[in-house]
Amino acid sequence: MNKVNLAEKFSRFSDHWSPKIVGELNGQQVKLVKLLGAFVWHHHENEDELFLVVKGRLRMELRDRVVEIDPGEFLIVPCGVEHRPVAEEEVHVLLFEPASTLNTGNVHGERTVETLERI
Amino acid sequence: MNKVNLAEKFSRFSDHWSPKIVGELNGQQVKLVKLLGAFVWHHHENEDELFLVVKGRLRMELRDRVVEIDPGEFLIVPCGVEHRPVAEEEVHVLLFEPASTLNTGNVHGERTVETLERI
């Protein structure tokens, strides 16, 4: 039961699209991830997903519109909603989501991370 | 499904110890709260609680120690653990916890907020 410093945790890794677990509560996980470039279109069958931007600008593409998310802002993407995160420059994001959430949702591919590291 | 800007939401209220709901996902809620002074000792029977400090310094008193939490840091207080938040100067906090969480946990009193406002 120690406090977590986000900047310190972000300094521990440099890879992109691979969320790291930094906290767990009530069956949910807090994850940190660095994004760069465009991800795959996907949705999550059962999990709502919260993206809180810590650094950079996250462009969240939805099928009908785009939401630009700046530091100090968050977006909740409900389950079933297709989305594609895009980061023109590196973005640091905090995720809140159920422990069962797979990063690529319904799309299994080379970017799927099955086992997340705890840092 | 709109993004939430934390600073804008914090600008909408000025009262202390009364969490406002700014997001919901997976049976959990994201709440914002302003703290000033010392709260009551309490614990939550079934809910783990995450405190992410956005502004100011939060002093979280536990029965065996104290954790000082600065902006960009969070602490998860597991269910059953007695705690008392103290803010010598005003602190802005983001909470992530189950929708069922009562602010004063097991202690019902004048500081208990039964119905939270959504902002």
Image (spheres, coloured by chain):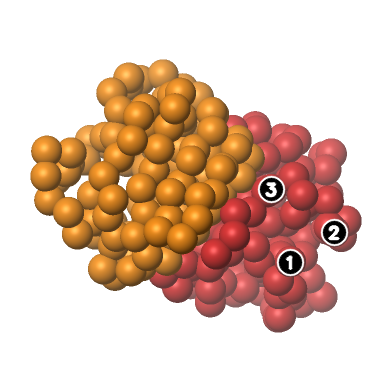
Chain colours: A red, B orange
Horizontal side, residue B56 vs residue B81: left or right? right
SS under mark 3: helix
Q: Are marks 1 and 2 in contact (CB under 8 Å)?
A: yes
Q: Earlier in the sequence, mark 3 or mark 2?
A: 3
Q: Nearer the viewer, residue B47 or B119?
A: B47
Whether residue A24 is visible = yes
Q: Amino acid at mark 3?
A: Leu
SS under mark 1: loop
Q: Nearer the viewer, residue B7 or A43?
A: B7
Circle 1 marks a residue in which chain?
A
Q: CA distance from mark 3 to mark 1?
A: 11 Å
Residue at (70% x, 80% y) in the render = A114
Same subunit: marks 1 and 2: yes
Whether residue A67 is visible = no
Circle 3 marks a residue in which chain?
A
Q: Amino acid at mark 1?
A: Ile
Query: The C terminus of chain A is located in which quarter?
Result: bottom right
Q: Nearer the viewer, residue B106 or B117?
A: B106
Q: CA distance from mark 1 to mark 2?
A: 9 Å
Q: Amino acid at mark 2?
A: Phe
Same subunit: marks 3 and 2: yes
Residue at (43% x, 32% y) in the render = B87
Horizontal side, residue A77 vs residue B81: left or right? right
Q: CA distance from mark 3 to mark 2?
A: 12 Å
SS under mark 2: loop
Q: Position of residue A75 (x, y in %)?
A: 52, 44
Residue at (40% x, 59% y) in the render = B63
Disc number placed over residue A13 in the picture, else none: 2
Mark 3 highlights which residue?
A: A6
Circle 2 marks a residue in which chain?
A
Mark 1 highlights which residue?
A: A119
How would you rate the neighbour count of disc 2 (Cα within 10 Å): few for under 14, some for 14-19, many for 20 or more?
some
